Image: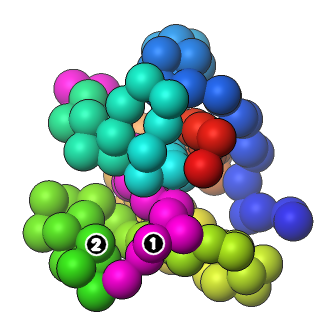
Amino acid sequence: MELPCKLETAPSWLTAARVLKRGHFSVVISEAQLPDATWEHVLSSLIYLEGPPRLIVISRLADDRLWAEVLNRCGFDVLAKPLARDEVVRVVGHALDRCEPLRAARGAGRGECVRAAGGN
């Protein structure tokens, strides 16, 4: 699956947090339940980063309740598993588009994404 950004993956939130410290990422794609964190923990950690990345949550149990909860807590979107290629590309592209004005003001290029993937 080719995303409209450079993608780095991490097996856990602890590893992803280390990756996030190495540079600026526009989007974080996280499983709803990681081995060491939940999406809520990931989102609450992202607010401490400069120009916080948009959070996209992935879940095989994606429903209206999860989607509403993610949006109400300022996450960007939810993707249901199994992932549909076109939907992933569309959602990540929209998340990057929302980050572009801020990145352009900083003189930065198109964003990068990090994906924290658990065993789910």
Residue 13 makes an appearance in the image: yes
In the figure, is residue 46 to the left or right of 20? left
Residue indicated by mark 2:
66
What residue is drawn where x is 24% and y is 45%? 40
Q: Position of residue 59 (x, y in %)?
A: 50, 64
The circle drawn on residue 17 is none
Tag 2 near tag 1, CB within 8 Å: yes
Q: Quadrant of the N terminus?
A: bottom right
Residue 87 lies in what quarter of the image?
bottom right
Residue 65 lies in what quarter of the image?
bottom left
Q: Which residues are magenta?
A: 47-63
Please name the amino acid that badge 1 sits on: Leu
In the figure, is residue 120 to the left or right of 32? right
- The mark that comes first in sequence, 2 or 1, is 1
In the figure, is residue 24 to the left or right of 98? right
Q: Main secondary structure of the magenta part?
A: loop
What residue is drawn where x is 72% and y is 35%? 8
Residue indicated by mark 1:
61
For marks 2 and 1, give the CA distance. Answer: 8 Å
What secondary structure is marked by label 2?
A: helix
What secondary structure is marked by label 1?
A: loop
What residue is drawn where x is 43% and y is 76%? 62
Q: Residues within 10 Å of mark 1 (few under 14, many from 20)?
A: few
Q: Position of residue 60 (x, y in %)?
A: 54, 69
